[in-house]
Amino acid sequence: MGVGERGVLVSGNWKMHINHFEALKLVQELAALLRAQALPEGCAASVHPPFTSLRTVQTAVETDRVPLALGAQTCHHADKGAFTGEVSAEMLAKLNVRYVIAGHSERRRGCGETDEMVRAKVDAILRHGMVPIVCVGEDADERASGAALDRVRAQVDAAFDGRPSAAVAAAVVAYEPIWAIGTGVTATPDDAEQMCAAIRAELARLAGPAAETTRIQYGGSVNPDNAAELLAQPNVDGLLVGGASLEAASFHAIARAAG
């Protein structure tokens, strides 16, 4: 199965940027661009605003029928409870969130999220009928020491081992080399393809042919200039975009690079 049959997913992770007024403006700008130039056939796009902007973005997307899926940046593993400051997958599902990022490197490193915590979040996302975007990736030291592949395989195993093949097939995995996030340094297309192919091979070991349907994104200093070359790789089925998703024209250009 080729990338065209899996489809392409380009996701904009807004991180801790953009208040709800700015979010509405950005969605309106994206809507105008998408009306003028639609995404290529087989390409979908999601936006992942901060929690405080989710309802605003949901209303704008649904009211104006903007061809964007609503995403969230994380969730808690429990459906409810005494977890001050947390947001559950159940709450996100009520807002018609479609995609939820789990295990982003900034949360693994900055918030102490372990592989076990990430797996519990994936459990919750799947339990409420949403699609996890499971982030995996190595840091500069792991890459330099030759441990990158082992680290990424371990993260894939922790998130997906023992899951039904249908859950693996429907999931998204985002390969984010930590040394490339927000640094302006991008993995070469060959580097991205090599690791994404290894991720698919590991998913195949865990779930068999279902791995051919799993979409694998690349993330790490993606921009309009490198998007097309990255998406041309056989096992790169999409992009997880950070800073370049905060500007409508930039994100639109990246999403259209799939064509």
Image (tube, rainbow, N blue to C red):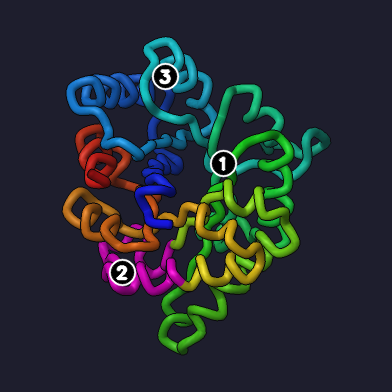
Q: Amino acid at mark 3?
A: Val
- Please give the residue where the numbered disc 2 appears in the rendered image: 187
Label 1 to label 2, Cα distance in Å?
24 Å
Total residue callouts: 3
Q: Label 2 amino acid?
A: Ala
Quarter where residue 7 is shown: top left
Q: Tell me which segment is drawn in magenta.
A: 176-197
Q: Is residue 252 above or below residue 174?
A: above
Whole-Å distance between the Cαs marked 3 and 2?
33 Å
Q: Earlier in the sequence, mark 3 or mark 2?
A: 3
Q: Is residue 59 visible?
A: yes
Q: Nearer the viewer, residue 144 or 39?
A: 39
Quadrant where the N terminus is found in the figure:
bottom left
Q: Residue furthest top?
A: 63
Q: Residue at x 38, y 56 (%)?
A: 2
Describe the element under mark 3 as helix, strand or loop: helix
Residue 100 painted magenta: no
Q: Mark 1 vs mark 2: which is more N-terminal?
A: 1
As for residue 181 lying within the magenta part, the answer is yes
Residue 94 left/right relative to 197: right
Residue bearing the label numbered 3: 61
Q: Nearer the viewer, residue 53 or 71?
A: 71
Residue 79 screen position, x and y as percent? 78, 35
Label 2 SS? loop
Mark 2 surroundings: few (<14), some (14-19) or many (≥20) residues within 10 A: many
Q: Which residue is mark 1?
A: 100
Is residue 170 shown above or below 139? above
Residue 102 at x, y = what percent? 59, 50
Residue at 67 percent across and 54 percent down: it is 165
